[in-house]
Image (cartoon, rainbow, N blue to C red):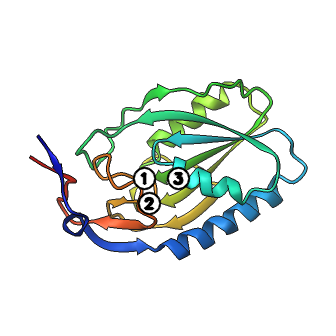
Amino acid sequence: MTTEQPLSEVLDQILIDEETLQARIAELGAQISRDYAGVNNLLLACVLKGGVVFLTDLMRHITVPHTIDFLAVSSYGQNIRETTGIVRIDMDLRCNIDGLNVLIVEDIIDSGTTLAYIRRMLQARNPASIKICTLLSKPSRRIVNVDIDYIGFDIPNKFVFGYGLDLDELYRNLPYIGVARPGASAEVS
């Protein structure tokens, strides 16, 4: 049987507090609204699971009509802190994106491998446009160059969790972005 580690044992520091997060998300929503003014076929394609909290707050600040859909991909495993480089589609979009303006909503872009794969996959479906919006970006970790249209925050090369991002599938509910203690695991045996 496993039990959860107390937050105090896995949290090293709060990197981005709730107030700073929410202010930046409002700014992103306003910018996206300006950029897509007059567009009536905007689709917010959220990458699960981590992007869902960001999506729900972001879409409240987007004033142009839009629809949402979800896809789930994985390149990490439980207790793995580095991407494997192998991208697996666990759940695909349910809607046809032919002719739509697609905005991919992601929680974090690290190596760029996953987003480059998603972009290529969706581009083959003939959307009117594809842009990328990420809450967090780790430019120092980039292996594959990915054009990111909207960035919430550039962050250092630290393992982060909270606000949708998990630590071993836990702590997604935190209202801030925290840095995990080196070697931290959310589970104990």
Label 2 close to label 1 by CB (< 8 Å): yes
Front residue of 89 and 125: 89
The quarter of the picture where the N terminus appears is top left
Identify which residue is drawn at 32% across, 50% down. Answer: 170
Indicate whether 152 appears above or below 72: below
Indicate whether 54 appears above or below 43: below
Residue that mark 1 sits on: 110
Give the SS element for disc 1.
Answer: loop
Front residue of 48 and 57: 57
Identify which residue is drawn at 46% across, 42% down. Answer: 49
Using residue 148 as the reference point, say whether residue 172 is left or right of it: left
Identify which residue is drawn at 46% across, 74% down. Answer: 17
Q: What residue type is labelled 2?
A: Lys
Give the x, y percent position of residue 97. Answer: 72, 28
- Which of the numbered marks, if any, corresponds to residue 138? 2
Mark 2–mark 1 Cα distance, whole angstroms, equals 5 Å
Mark 1–mark 3 Cα distance, whole angstroms, equals 18 Å
Query: Where on the picture, by quarter, is residue 120?
Result: top right
Residue count near mark 1 (Cα–Cα under 10 Å), binned few <14, some 14–19, many ≥20:
many
- Which of the numbered marks, if any, corresponds to residue 53? 3
Q: What residue type is labelled 1?
A: Asp
1 or 3: tag closer to the N-terminus: 3
Using residue 115 as the reference point, say whether residue 87 is left or right of it: left
